Image (cartoon, coloured by chain):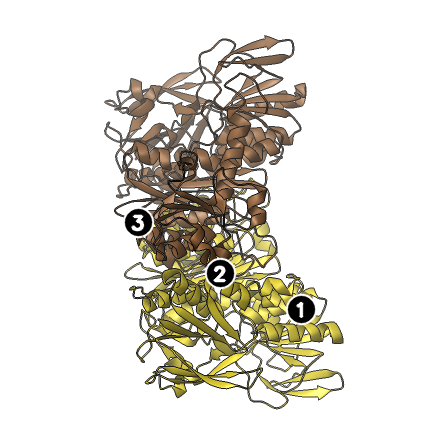
Chain colours: A brown, B yellow
């Protein structure tokens, strides 16, 4: 059997190694357009920032080592320019030699990846504009920084790569502006959950420009000016474009393969394309999202590797399937961590799923053991089925742990209320006897069993202040004095039973505390005293986090002034 | 409704607060024998070590605060001495006043906990022998250390409390000997997995005495001598007894409640005892282990809290059930972490479960990002059903995360091979594109689909060295030279294909490498070349870890000499 693989990074390299493990006699050829195979894609921003110091750490695998160990014939700097699915051949061009030749295959695996979106706008071809997708991109940027010692950078795009690049450039001492078209960074997070991220980046000196459309670039001496739609230009010594990637599928298109969203390659669960004996994996393929069951593009290394393995199994006559990714992801933001799994509110709405959300602020470990940090956690579940839909967590310690626990629960199809039963490992340095994930389960159970009703931060400002409802803040007088929401009156929780007569009967009561726990206790007291009441999800802490972040960003742009 | 609760720590305090949340009108009385309620049991060793510096951090809740918030009438220093389940009354003695009185109940919840095992042996009543179960125990020990400035301590018992106490006493500068009756510390770990723990503690200056039965204590000036069965006595300035706990159920026994193993209280899933309207929770009750389905005693805070909640629900007319604990636990050992969930090999054997095991040594995060640490992970699954049975992990970073992911997978009833599909959050600082838990799944899948057969470290020394089988080490010559197993010949993996003629045909081949990955690749090559071969589980690294730890401990005692 002769297997040809187009693309030698995550999915392609995984497939090649797996095929060899399954079939010692197969001939395996990998064509890779860049000069490097199986490189550390997700490490590239950290090489720019000097966190990863050795180029060899990015390019641990070489064609020679791959041959020695796996007898895989890796041809770097070779581009596959055409596929004949009828004749079962590919046309290859050696980028060094210019030599063009054909290679036949019995099985073909396409792992072409995705390419950075490069908008067609004035000035885009400046030598001061970089992308960060390949090792070559990275070395080029690194060399520019070494040679030109830029003092400032504009990063365009607030996804994973843009933020990691911004952090790393800031770490090098550059003044960094981070520009994002949408109203918040990190699309996997909802706006409210991204607010802590905004505050964190600004706190580390990164200038944040949200709701900002870039329209052009202009050279200005040794600087480059990024022109924006709201008229506020940004001058800096370099620009990094990280506005996302798009499936790199010209080859597949020309070969007549069926394509889906954004030109992605359509595959079935076995990673088979529409052409016989042609498989495709990685960022270039359209997948079914595990949670929504809908078609999706997911550019993440984990799924790419898993798909490579599945394709390899099927190439070798096994029967493996890929059940779809759920988009679990995590990012370091200086000392902060933001992570998500499954779908967020926007995605749930887009998919037409009736969801409920909870927000909590648990500590990373037992309060009496030093070093614990508060995290903000949002969990979504489907209203009727109670199926877990997704989770988002932003915090410091222990965020990656809880997101992986929730990712596992989602994968296993657990009900949201079953989170109460998770038997997680507890010792004071690691968790609490009731882990944050258990707490999420308890909160959901209380909602599901009608022990409490909620209202959310995006409803607070629209609640009537005409006395038709009671707005109650049950924190201590000192907390209340430090900051409260207009119209909420203060009765501390521990005084509530004695002061019930101050709360008008027969009117709904909306109760707030700092995190949502004391207000829940207040709701239980009020409910049993005949009140119809609502608990404020996430508490004042979450409300204020969103409000502060909004204030910092929203006020900046409608008038075209940057006050950040 | 009048509810009486006996015991105001984890289970009892949880129940009291939950009952109030469910029933504003219930009368709730908690009797607690010690002077403290809802205290930080798991934090006590860290107070001794000065990691937790404030006594108030251990005793955050007070009877006054519990009254203010929950209207729970907490009576500390009150002991319930008798229960009349017919009359529905308890007899109470005020330990300060000596006053004895009766209290009636509609519902009774027993949360008496467990008490430290205090062996009846000569010298046990010395003032230099301490236990560490209550706040009072802890303050007493703390005061002794402050006043007497001991230079050395003997900790007896190598479970969680013993090890945490040893670490904390060592942290104070004491010379610590840790004495354990069994052949290894931390019963939730198998012997082989505990070896890294032994090495870690010895590396931090703790003298480790395994296989050591204590027979008596003797005063000797300002010291206390711990006499042992093998004749090697230990002289130190103090002794901490931490040889486990036993259900504290005299009260339940006298009340005629049905008792189970070690005098534990028998309850059903609703936490109901054999007496009407009497519930029991926490360390005192017998539970069904979630994995084995067998009766078990589990003294952990997580399950106790969950049981308290379940009992409270049922007391209030709901229908909640507790589905059994799976024993998830974690412990800090200086900079190391050891954790487990589900059952280990000993427990699987005891339960008559046919299991298979895998051992791997994954890095905590991507190798190219600085700071990653190797962990040792063992996963057990049931042979026929592929049901996940348990996992043990010892390492540094990321251990607690992976054990919680595996705990969740076990809870959800996932098959071991489904670990391959977990979509976990990856970024270089946190994990690898194939997370360690995914890797465990891939290894299991390879075994289950007959891609590889294994042999284990406890079989290595008994393999014949008579040429009837080939013992092959596929590491590099340098690794081989640094340390190898007697009888294994070295052919590096990358040379294997060229040197197949050196390996006798028709004889089984047992292959070893450092971690088990390269030897797996070698097995795939050999298998496809007609060899019958076996992969060494865990690699030389694991074998050597066990061998070194054994050498340090086993040689010490048969002759009564401590060389540790």
Q: Earlier in the sequence, mark 2 or mark 1?
A: 2
Residue B271: x and y in percent read 34, 71
Of badges 2 and 1, nearer the viewer stands: 2
Residue identified by numbered label 3: A413
Is disc 2 in the same subunit as disc 1? yes
Residue identified by numbered label 1: B169
Residue identified by numbered label 2: B69
- Dividing the picture into quadrants, the one containing residue A206 is top right
Q: Nearer the viewer, residue B545 or B213?
A: B213
Horizontal side, residue B329 vs residue A146: left or right = left
Q: Pointer 1 indicates a residue of which chain?
A: B
Residue A143: x and y in percent read 62, 22
Above or below, A511 against B285 in this view is: above
Considering the image in quadrants, where does the C terminus of chain A appear?
top right
Considering the image in quadrants, where does the N terminus of chain A appear?
top left
Above or below, A221 against B183 in this view is: above
Q: Pointer 2 indicates a residue of which chain?
A: B
Q: Nearer the viewer, residue A218 or A209?
A: A209
- How much space separates mark 1 and mark 3, taking CA atoms? 45 Å
């Amino acid at each position: 059997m002769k297997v040809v693989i187009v693309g030698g990074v995550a999915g392609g390299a995984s497939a090649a190694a797996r095929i060899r493990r399954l079939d010692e006699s197969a001939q395996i050829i990998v064509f890779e357009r860049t000069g490097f195979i199986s490189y550390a894609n997700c490490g590239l921003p950290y090489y720019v920032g000097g966190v990863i110091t050795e180029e060899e750490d990015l390019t641990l695998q070489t064609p020679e080592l791959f041959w020695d160990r796996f007898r895989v014939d890796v041809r770097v700097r070779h581009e596959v320019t055409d596929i004949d699915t009828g004749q079962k051949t590919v046309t290859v061009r050696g980028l060094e030699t210019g030599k063009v030749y054909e290679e036949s295959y019995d099985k073909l695996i396409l792992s072409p990846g995705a390419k950075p979106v490069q908008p067609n706008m004035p000035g885009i071809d400046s030598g001061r504009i970089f992308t960060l997708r390949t090792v070559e991109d990275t070395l080029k940027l690194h060399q520019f920084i070494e040679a030109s010692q830029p003092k400032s950078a504009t990063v365009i795009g607030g996804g994973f790569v843009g933020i990691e690049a911004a952090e790393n450039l800031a770490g090098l001492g550059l003044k960094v502006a981070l520009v994002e078209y949408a109203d918040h960074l990190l699309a996997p997070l909802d706006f409210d959950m991204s607010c802590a991220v905004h505050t964190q980046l600004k706190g580390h000196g990164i200038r944040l420009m949200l709701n900002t459309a870039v329209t052009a670039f202009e050279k200005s001496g040794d600087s480059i000016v990024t022109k924006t739609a709201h008229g506020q230009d940004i001058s800096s010594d370099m620009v990094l474009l990280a506005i996302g990637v798009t499936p790199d599928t010209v080859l597949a298109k020309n070969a007549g393969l069926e394509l889906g969203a954004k030109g992605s390659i359509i595959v079935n669960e076995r990673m088979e394309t529409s052409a016989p004996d042609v498989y495709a994996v990685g960022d270039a393929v359209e997948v079914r999202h595990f949670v929504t069951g809908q078609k999706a593009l997911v550019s993440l290394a984990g799924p790419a590797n898993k798909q490579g393995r599945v394709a390899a199994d099927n190439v070798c006559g096994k029967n493996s399937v890929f059940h779809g990714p759920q988009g679990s992801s995590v990012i370091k933001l200086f000392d902060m961590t933001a992570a998500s799994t499954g779908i967020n509110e926007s995605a749930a709405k887009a998919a037409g799923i009736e969801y409920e959300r909870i927000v909590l602020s648990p500590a990373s470990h037992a309060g009496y053991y030093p070093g614990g940090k508060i995290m903000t956690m949002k969990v979504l579940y489907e209203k009727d089925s109670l199926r877990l839909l997704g989770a988002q967590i932003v915090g410091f310690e222990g965020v990656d742990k809880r997101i992986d626990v929730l990712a596992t629960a989602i994968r296993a199809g657990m009900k949201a209320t079953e989170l109460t039963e998770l038997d997680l490992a507890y010792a004071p340095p690691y968790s609490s006897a009731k882990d944050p994930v258990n707490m999420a389960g308890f909160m959901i159970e209380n909602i599901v069993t009608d022990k409490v009703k909620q209202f959310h931060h995006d409803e607070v400002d629209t609640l009537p202040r005409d006395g038709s409802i009671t707005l109650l803040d049950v924190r201590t007088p000192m907390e209340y004095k430090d900051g409260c929401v207009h119209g909420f009156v203060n009765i501390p929780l521990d005084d509530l039973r004695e002061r019930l007569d101050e709360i008008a009967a027969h009117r709904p009561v909306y109760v707030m505390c700092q995190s949502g726990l004391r207000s829940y206790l207040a709701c239980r007291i009020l409910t049993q005293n005949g009140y119809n009441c609502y608990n404020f999800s996430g508490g004042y802490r979450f409300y204020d986090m969103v409000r502060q972040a909004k204030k910092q960003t929203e006020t900046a742009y409608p008038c075209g002034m940057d006050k950040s």
